[in-house]
Amino acid sequence: MPQIVVLPHGEICPEGAVIDAKTGDNLIELILDNGIALEHACEMACACTTCHIVVREGFDSLAESEELEDDLLDKAWGLEADSRLSCQVEIGDKDLVIEIPKYTINQVSENH
């Protein structure tokens, strides 16, 4: 059973978190179900970048991103080579370590 390690984020997840997952789970749904208020302004429709995360470990265990996600990621604040939109990530069979970037391009918090 893979685990998702969420690195500490000053506002959203100050202590960090470890989340048990199953292969095939959706990353943002796991994050939200575990009390981490990650923004998702488009309601997980792959239409914005507010759920942007950086995969620090385990990136290669994920399916490749599709063109729409890649196009949106080009607009994300703090884009890195291992960036993904968490609404588009299906958990593979390996543990992941993720970092939530300090900022998003969303000017108004949706407070989900």
Image (cartoon, rainbow, N blue to C red):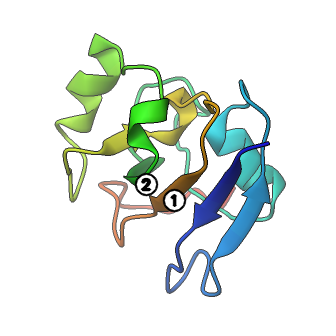
Q: Nearer the viewer, residue 83 or 44?
A: 83
- Position of the N terminus, as image quadrant, is top right
Q: Nearer the viewer, residue 44 or 96?
A: 96
Rendered image: mark on residue 25: none
Q: Whole-Å distance between the Cαs marked 2 and 1?
A: 5 Å
6 up-or-down from 4: above or below: below
Residue that label 1 marks = 97
From the top left corner, tell me how far across and down residue 57 is, in percent: 43, 54
Report the side of 65 relative to 33 (left or right). Answer: left
Give the amino acid type for the residue marked by disc 2 in the picture.
Glu
Residue 16 on image: x %, y %? 62, 78
| Secondary element type, mark 2 | strand
> Is disc 1 surrounded by few (<14), some (14 to 19) or many (20+) residues within 10 Å?
some
Please, what is the three-letter code of the amino acid marked with disc 1?
A: Val
Which percent across, then down, holds residue 109?
51, 62
Q: Is residue 16 left or right of residue 62?
A: right
Query: In the shown orientation, is residue 49 left or right of residue 1?
Result: left
CB of mark 2 within 8 Å of CB of mark 1? yes
User: Upstream in the sequence, badge 2 or badge 1?
Assistant: 2
Q: Which residue is mark 2?
A: 57
Q: Quadrant of residue 22?
A: top right
Position of residue 50 relative to residue 19, above or below, is: above
In percent of the image, x 73 and y 29: which residue is there? 23
Residue at (55, 34) in percent of width and height:
87
